[in-house]
Amino acid sequence: MAGRSASLRQAYDGVVAAVPITIPYERFSPEPAHWWIARALGSLVRGAKITPKDIDGFCVSSFTLFPDTAVGLTQHLGLTPRWLDHIPMGGASGVVGLRRAARAVQCGDADIVACVAGDANHVDSFRRMLSSFSRFAQDASYPYGSGGPNASFALMTDHYMKTYGAKREDLGKICVAQRENALSFPHALMKKPLTLEQYMSARPIADPIALFDCVMPCAGADAFLVMSEETAKDLGLPAVRILSTIERHNAFPDDPIQIRGGWEMDREELWSMAGVTPDDVDLLETYDDYPIISMMQFEDLGFCKKGEGAEFVRSHDLTNSGSFPHNTSGGQLSVGQAGASGGYLGMVEAMRQLTGSALGTQVEQAKIAVVSGFGMINYDRGLCSGAAVLAGAGT
Amino acid sequence: MTEAIKRPARKNPQKRTVLPTLPPTSRSRKALGFTAAAAEGRFVLQVCEDCGAVTYPPREACPKCLAMDLAWKDMPEGGLLIAETTIRTSTNVYFRERTPWRSGTVALDAGITVLAHIHGDVAEDGRVRMIARTDKSGQGVLMALPEQETANMADDRQLRELTCDPKHRRVLITDGRTPLGQAMARAVSEAGAAVVFVGIAETWRPYAGADRLAAIPNVEIMALDVTDTISVDELAGEIGGRVDILINTAEHVRAGGVMDRDGIVTARDEMEVNYFGLMRLIQAFGPGMRFRGADGVNSACAWVNLLSVYALSNWPAYGSTSASQAAAYSLSQCLRGEFHSSGVKVVNAFFGPLEEDWRQQLPPPKVTPEGLAKAVVGALRQGLEDLAVGAVAEDFLVRWKEDPRVLERELTQSEGV
């Protein structure tokens, strides 16, 4: 049975996502993950004008819930769902949560699924998480300088720059544009403008990565609801349709170092299932814990060819009013990285943009959005990737 | 190019001593197979017995065919540096104190890529030679060295964290009366040791080679009798804060087993030197060395036990001595545990029959005192923790690793060696 071809996936007809919630991030907070997730869940219930009993599906992502899982949260928060999921996929959690929940609703396993990501950030929790992140990291990456994701992405960045001739200025342009987007987004932790000169002269962290290439770990939560189109209509909720989604794990394991993600394996199906092309996309939310991975997503999702990411960046204005609105709330690089919430940030932002309810600068005529997720540097590379094409109600 | 490290100035006793911190210690149980080989200086990776795939990091099953049989095998050393970074901030205190730290991705000739520490002389995108060693946490790590030897290569800051190079360090050799002790003093002196303290019991009693020993550069003769607690404590009081490497050359060896001996006088002498002697040394010098595990260029770094290979499995021809050596070996394992927090390595050199008076009747091949001394200095320079010296010991270790029970049967049959 070697090499069986995969079957084609079915469309998400009649399923929508609604009520995007962001609980404003905090650099450090003594509150535990449970507190952040509870706040997000409460906001969902109030935002949808439903009761907790109406939530019959619950999907959770968090790094800092230990010793609890989604199971413990049901009792803690008084939910009695008939469908429960816990997605440990870091930056891919938003896309994967959406696609799991969408199928549950589509197949009648649940009527209203609450998808929530939230993480604590105590003063020492980042160090603790890094030192026990995964078995492979513990055995084979953490002992080599304990640079954490900074070092992992430094190696990827170094290799990519050498291979394709990308410059730090190109990566800097991504960060600078995102900071501009963030200045109008009320929840962004970074409030000051960033110039390319500041980016270039920033304190080095793990060469070639410097301070403004790195996200700031913080505490926070993001959430949304998945339900049928009729339910959303009944509740009077603005919603977005799910045109297509993909996920992939441990793609290209024989690449000596990460130069592409799993999107490249599945992008054809992503576009054909959605019935749109990259040219139709009004805004893109990439997973951006470091600018290099955003550049790879431009390529691997098909917005440009492999190796042309730098040129693509040079030829576009990535701000909300520009030719290619990208990470329209400022992304993690400017808003902060609240653990697994980082995988939700782009999702809730795209939902707000598509429903005309952006908290910051609204992208004009935002009809089609792509949200991309990436997560889990298990050893030397990110293993999880995913993407979703979303459409506003008017399309 | 690596700059030669300079001999440190005399320590200012009013200044704070930098305390030892460790790089990350946690590993999966499987990864300890890599560590055990690295302690011998061997670079091994898992190879699938079914499909031949080389795999890393350590796994429970082959990622190519899911076979469960993964064997540790020696790997070709070559590789190519394909990406690198210089880490300037780290969440780990050990690395935080040692930044900037160079690490990178190496595409091995063995067909896979690994993360590794990178020697300062490795060229960008250059060919490398991989070594596996234990770091200060006692865990195995990989380091990429330049393919060709470079000037002052051993002085690289990151490499020196993995090695116990005697250069600029102060060494105590516990017994200089024997040809072995004298050969050891000569070898560490030649290796660039700043001071070579050589212990002599009952200094008033003459011994062969005394003049030549005293003439070795940087040698300082010290009164030391490992069978006398007061003598050991007195010396530790005098130089305990300045011993960076301790090489225990004291041994008491007599042929014979148990049944044909009358009483326990000889056995007690053996234990007095081989076991209690080691214990006295540990109690007197261990705490000082543990405190000084990160004390700069001449930090405390190694404790060397010279153990008869028959410490691992008794040879009845030297049965009673073997038992005392087994006791010493067991104590060395305890010492390794007690030194763990300090980064000081316990080096166990297992040697076969030595070319010296008390083993006169034994047939060749034998290890010369000079050969054993050279092997120990080599191990210190390379940062090894476990080594076998001489053909007999090497063969013995192979058989012991293969099946200690079978080896025991071999040794306890009359012609067994």
Image (tube, coloured by chain):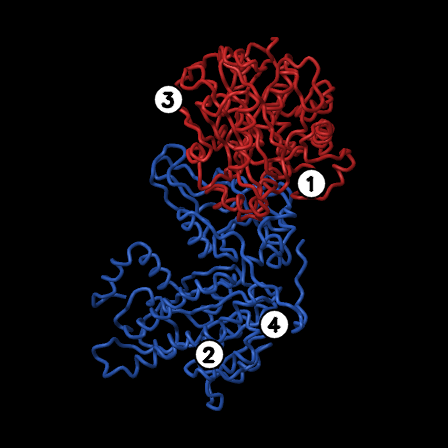
Chain colours: A red, B blue
Q: Nearer the viewer, residue A185 or B218?
A: A185
Q: State the image coordinates of residue A138 (x, y, percent, origin top left).
A: 49, 45
Amino acid type of disc 2? Asp
The one of A165 and B207 positioned closer to us in this rendering: A165
Is residue B80 in view from this perspective?
no
Residue B170 point in image, percent of width and height? 57, 72
Name the side, left or right, on which A20 lies relative to B6: left
- As displayed, is residue B105 above or below residue A187? below
Which circle marks residue A210 in the picture?
Answer: 1
Whole-angstrom CA distance, mark 4 to mark 1, is 42 Å
Same chain for the residues at labels 1 and 2, yes or no? no
Question: Which chain contains the residue that carries disc 1?
Answer: A
Mark drawn on residue B175: 2
Residue B194 - label: 4
The residues bearing labels 4 and 3 have C-alpha atoms spaced at a distance of 65 Å
Q: Residues within 10 Å of mark 1 (few under 14, many from 20)?
A: some
* Tags 4 and 1 both on a single chain: no
Can you give x and y, in whole percent of width and height, for residue B271 in the image?
34, 77
* Marks 2 and 4, how far apart at CA: 19 Å
Residue type indicated by callout 1: Ala
Q: Quadrant of residue B150?
A: bottom right
Q: Residue at x 36, y 42 (%)?
A: B70
